[in-house]
Image (cartoon, rainbow, N blue to C red):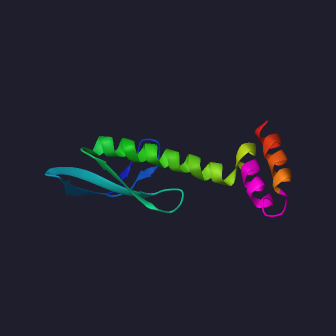
Amino acid sequence: MAKKATNGTSVPAYTRVRRRDNFYLRARVYDADGKRVDIYAKDEEELTEKVLQAQKRIEELRFSKVNPTVAEYSEKWLEMQAAHVRPSTLRGYELTVRK
C-alpha cells in the first residue's frame, strides 16, 4: 500500500481509521528522536503532502542535531562548564556568549 512520491521519497503505508464518527487515513513516521508520530488526513493526496512535509522537517531536525549552530554549541558548553567554575565566572561567560 505504500505509494511513491513524485520526488522519489517513499510514503509509508497508511491505514483507514475511525475517529469521532469520521474516517481518516493514518500514516506513521518516526521523528528525529525515534518516536512514532501519527499523521491523519481525509484523502490520499492530503496525506502524501503532510507526510512529505513531516519528513522534510524531520530531516532538518536531524541535520541541526548533527551540525549545531554556534549559539547551540555555546549553550551546551556553558552547561558543561557550570559544574567546574565559580558562579561569578559563569556569569561572565554567559554575558560573553550572549553578546
Give the x, y percent position of residue 23.
18, 51
- The kind of secondary structure the magenta stretch mainly shows is helix
Compared with 48, 79 (above or below) is below
Looking at this view, is 31 or 90 the one in front? 90
* Between 39 and 1, the one nearer to me in the picture: 39
Percent x, y of residue 60: 57, 46
Left-right relation of 37 to 59? left
Q: Quadrant of residue 12?
A: bottom left
**Visible residue check, residue 69:** no
Does 95 sit left or right of 3 as displayed?
Answer: right
The region drawn magenta spans 73-86
Residue furthest front as drawn: 88
How far across and how far down the image is residue 78, in percent?
Answer: 77, 53
| Quadrant occupied by the N terminus | bottom left
31 is within the stretch colored magenta:
no
Q: Is residue 43 left or right of residue 7?
A: left
Residue 24 position, x and y percent, is 23, 50
Residue that protrudes farthest toward the left in the picture: 21
Which quadrant is home to the C terminus?
top right
Which is nearer the eye, 13 or 57?
Answer: 57
